[in-house]
Image (spheres, rainbow, N blue to C red):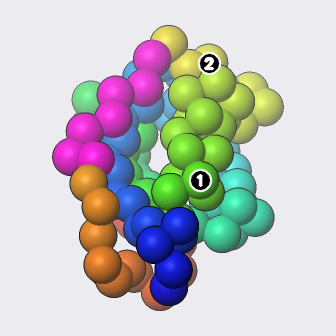
Amino acid sequence: MSAAALLKSVDYEVFGRVQGVCFRMYTEGEAKKIGVVGWVKNTSRGTVTGQVQGPEEKVEAMKSWLSKVGSPSSRIDRTNFSNEKNISTLDYSNFSIRY
């Protein structure tokens, strides 16, 4: 790992119409396409929450997707990001949907 490829970790919560619209499935697909690891799950509050880890630029790309794109029939009102930090190793080996 070079210094240029800093690993980042960030927690997220997506608000809007994000349940019952295949949001988790699309999030998993997008994460695998971009090349980040972590997880996604529905909450009892009607939001989607999770964590993304990977090289900084890939995490930024995923944050942009979670804020603006989502699944085709979703509506993203806002996305909160928290606990953003640099990490030395990834906590996950892939991206998964949690239940």
User: Residue 75: which numbered mark, if any?
Assistant: 2
**Whether residue 90 is situated above or below residue 97 in the rendered picture:** below
The one of 99 and 90 positioned closer to us in this rendering: 90
Q: Which residues are magenta?
A: 78-84
User: Residue 37: which numbered mark, if any?
Assistant: none
Relative horizontal placement of residue 47, taking residue 77 as reference (left or right): left
The residue under label 1 is 57
From mark 2 to mark 1, how far is it between C-alphas? Answer: 25 Å
Q: Position of residue 57 (x, y in %)?
A: 59, 53
Query: Which residue is drawn at the image coordinates 71% and 37% (left, top)?
Result: 71
In the rendered structure, which disc, 2 or 1, sits on the residue that comes first in sequence? 1
Query: Which residue is drawn at the image coordinates 45% and 17% (left, top)?
Result: 78
Check disc 2: other Cα within 10 Å, few if <14, some if 14-19, many if 20+.
some
Which element is circle 2 on?
strand
Q: Nearer the viewer, mark 2 or mark 1?
A: 1
Q: Which amino acid type is shown beneath numbered disc 2?
A: Arg
Which element is circle 1 on?
helix
Relative horizontal placement of residue 23, taking residue 40 as reference (left or right): right
Q: Position of residue 76 (x, y in %)?
A: 56, 20
Q: Is residue 79 magenta?
A: yes
Q: Are marks 2 and 1 in contact (CB under 8 Å)?
A: no
Q: Position of residue 35 (x, y in %)?
A: 66, 69
Screen quadrant of the C terminus: bottom left
**Whether residue 89 is situated above or below residue 45 in the rendered picture:** below
Q: Is residue 24 visible?
A: no
Q: Position of residue 47 (x, y in %)?
A: 37, 32
**Whether residue 87 is situated above or below residue 86 in the rendered picture:** below
